[in-house]
Image: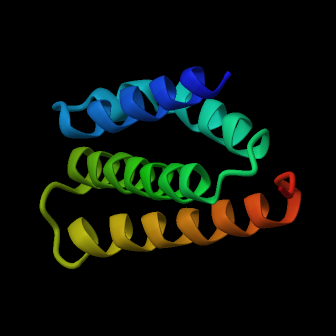
Amino acid sequence: MRLGRLVLLVIASVLLISQGGAIVAAPVTLPLLAWASSRTASRGFRAAAVLVAGLTIAECAWAFIYVSAGEAQPAIWLVPVAGGVTTTLVFAAALSRFAPRS
């Protein structure tokens, strides 16, 4: 199971650096990251999953704003930053509350 979580994290991270891969795969990767993170006591994995989830949502928010409003300032950078930070905080709070303790 440990290898599966690592593979999931690597795939989600690689999708982030691809052109649009994280956006397309977000409906699958985000719930899987949340599920895998809630099943481990590893703080390192949970921290990495929170970071990848926040960056994925930031990329999705950027794509939404870019398609709907073009490069309108400040929305092109403000909405992704707000979405990424909010997701990171909510994801981290949920994982710290529900994750198993070692």
Is 83 rendered above or below residue 78? Answer: above
Which residue is painted at 58% across and 20% down in the image?
4
Locate the C terminus by quadrant.
Answer: bottom right
Does residue 68 appear left or right of residue 55 in this picture?
left
Which residue is painted at 30% across and 30% down in the image?
15
Which residue is painted at 86% across and 52% down in the image?
100
Q: How many marks?
A: 0
Closer-to-camera residue (89/11): 11
Colour mapping used in the image: rainbow
Is 9 rendered above or below residue 94? Answer: above
Does residue 17 appear left or right of residue 31 in this picture?
left
Does residue 88 appear left or right of residue 23 in this picture?
right
Closer-to-camera residue (20/92): 92
Name the spot of residue 32 as percent of width and height, x first.
63, 30
Closer-to-camera residue (2/55): 2
Name the spot of residue 51 as percent of width and height, x first.
45, 58
Query: Looking at the rendering, which quadrant does residue 39 occupy?
Result: top right
Does residue 67 appear left or right of residue 82 in this picture?
left
Name the spot of residue 93 as percent of width and height, x first.
73, 69
Name the spot of residue 42 as percent of width and height, x first.
66, 51
Query: Looking at the rendering, which quadrant does residue 38 occupy?
Result: top right
Which residue is painted at 37% across and 69% down in the image?
79
- In the rendered image, the residue lying farthest to the front is 102
Locate the N terminus by quadrant.
Answer: top right
- In the rendered image, the residue lying farthest to the left is 71
